[in-house]
Image: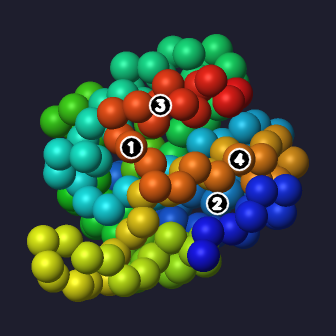
Amino acid sequence: MPLKENSPAPEFSLPDEKGVVHHLSDYRGRVVLLYFYPKDDTPGCTTEACNFRDDYSAYEQAGVVILGVSPDSPKSHAKFKEKYHLPFSLLADEDHKVCELYGVWGRKKFMGREYDGVFRTTYLIDAQGMIKKVFEEVKPAEHSKEVLASI
């Protein structure tokens, strides 16, 4: 179950594509768009990331920090970020503990196969660290515009 709106966003510490550790508390005082996605360089995840990239200046103007989170390694994130010129940090949750903390890890089905993975979910966290909006069952192609419309 994803976390609820108007509840505190759980603190976390995760390395980015360069190995630099990010703490949610580092961003206190700023709005954070924390988006969880299944896998680097797959069609849906690439569409979602590139739309955030293309709309990045609008997020900057609104004072929003974008952080992507997936179970991929920092090395995988570095390749993904470089390939698509992503201007925001991608955080590596290799043991999926933060995904579990945020309620976005669980049993999925794809082409008749069951496996554990990330439910594509986005949290908009306000400057005080409270969850203001939860986006579930995200459609990658429309998601960035949907988030911008809610800011």
Q: Quadrant of the C terminus?
A: top right
Query: For numbered disc 4, what is the local secondary structure?
Result: strand
Q: What label sits on residue 133 in the rendered view?
A: 4
Element carrying mark 2 = strand
Mark 3 → mark 2, Cα distance in angstroms: 23 Å
Between the C-alphas of marks 3 and 1, the distance is: 9 Å
Q: Are there few (<14), some (14-19), or many (20+) residues within 10 Å of tag 3?
A: many
What amino acid is labelled 4 in the image?
A: Lys
- Residue, x 42% and y 81% (percent of image)? 106
Number of residues whose C-alpha sits closer than 10 Å to that of mark 1, classed few (under 14), some (14–19) or many (20 or more): some
> How far apart are labels 1 and 4 at the CA level?
16 Å
How many angstroms separate mark 4 from mark 3 (CA)?
Answer: 14 Å
Q: Which residue is mark 3?
A: 144
Characterize the local packing of mark 4: few (<14), some (14-19) or many (20 or more) Cα atoms within 10 angstroms.
many
Report the mark closest to the observer, 3 or 2.
3
Q: Amino acid at mark 3?
A: Ser
Q: Secondary structure at mark 1?
A: loop
Q: Nearer the viewer, mark 4 or mark 2?
A: 4
Q: Nearer the viewer, mark 3 or mark 1?
A: 1
Q: Earlier in the sequence, mark 1 or mark 4?
A: 4
Residue contact between numbered discs 1 and 4, judged by CB atoms under 8 Å: no
* Left or right of 114, for residue 151: right
What numbered label is drawn on residue 5? none
- Quickly name the residue at label 2: 23
Percent position (x, y) of residue 99?
Answer: 50, 72
Closer to viewer: mark 1 or mark 4: 1
Colour scheme used in the picture?
rainbow
Q: Residue lying farthest front?
A: 112
Tell me the distance, in whole angstroms, between the alpha carbons under discs 4 and 2.
20 Å
Q: Which mark is residue 139?
A: 1
Query: Can you give x and y, in whole percent of width and height, for residue 56 in the image?
Result: 47, 22
